[in-house]
Amino acid sequence: MDKKKQLVTESSLQSYFYKILEEINNGIISPLPQEFIFYSSDVLDQYGDAKKFESEKPLGIKFLEAGSCKTQEKKKILKEVGDQSLLMSSYYSFSIEKKIINKDYYIKLGKSAYSRLNQLSPELYDVPSFFSNLSQRFEILAALCLRLSLELNSDNEEEYELKLHELEDKLSYLEKIIMKIDRKPKKAA
């Protein structure tokens, strides 16, 4: 993880995220399907600019209002709510740490949005019930994206471990497991 000002030469931001997420995903006991990793790397790419989160309405209100929209608009809104909730519960979770609405809210909102989206658009990447399955594995995918965030925002192993230690009491059991996969074992003193 030592990143001494390396030049990244990926063809796109999406492929950069995909490569890292795939590596993390391959380290867990039951890896998520590649389609979920591809989808989440695409979401990370789309929302790479935090300005895309700017909205006149909170995500929860958008979610509720989607129910009264026509089908195509409803799909678009539910996808947007699910995608942004995925990032708010993971990659950007540090920015909401001291807010009234926490990442658990975004996890529930994202799962609900993807579940409802599945009713309207059940197939993506030739995977039946794609959004239903994504909803069921939302916490795992969010934990992978959180790990990605920590890795990208740490210059070296020591900094990663320090940040992880600072977060220890705020992480769920699942997040703690994913944060430590493929970590080098500490040497006994």
Image (spheres, grey):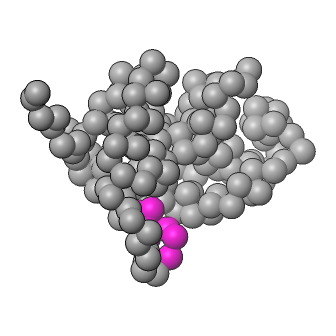
Q: Which residues are magenta?
A: 12-18
The answer to whether 87 is drawn above or below residue 100 in the figure is: below
Of residues 65 and 144, the one drawn nearer to the viewer in this rendering: 144
In the image, residue 16 lies in the stretch drawn in magenta: yes
Q: Is residue 120 left or right of residue 129?
A: right
- Whole-percent x, y for residue 178 in the image: 32, 36
Quarter of the rendering containing residue 168: top left
Q: Is residue 178 left or right of residue 44?
A: left
In the image, residue 114 lies in the stretch drawn in magenta: no
The answer to whether 9 is drawn above or below residue 130 in the figure is: below
Q: What residue is rendered at 81% in x and 50% in y?
A: 54
Q: Considering the image in quadrants, where does the N terminus appear?
A: bottom left
Q: What residue is rendered at 17% in x and 35% in y?
A: 186
Magenta highlight: main SS: helix
- Whole-percent x, y for residue 156 in the image: 36, 52
The answer to whether 76 is drawn above or below residue 178 in the figure is: below
Of residues 16 and 98, the one drawn nearer to the viewer in this rendering: 98
Count of marks overlaid on the render: 0
Q: Considering the image in quadrants, where does the C terminus appear?
A: top left
Residue 33 shows in this picture: no
Of residues 156 and 137, the one drawn nearer to the viewer in this rendering: 156
Q: What residue is rendered at 32% in x and 47% in y?
A: 157
Q: What residue is rendered at 68% in x and 43% in y?
A: 81
Q: Is residue 56 left or right of residue 168?
A: right
**Most extreme residue toward the right, as rendered?**
56
**Most extreme residue toward the left, as rendered?**
188
Of residues 161 and 60, the one drawn nearer to the viewer in this rendering: 161
- Whole-percent x, y for residue 30 in the image: 23, 40
- Whole-percent x, y for residue 163 in the image: 44, 36
The answer to whether 85 is drawn above or below residue 105 in the figure is: below
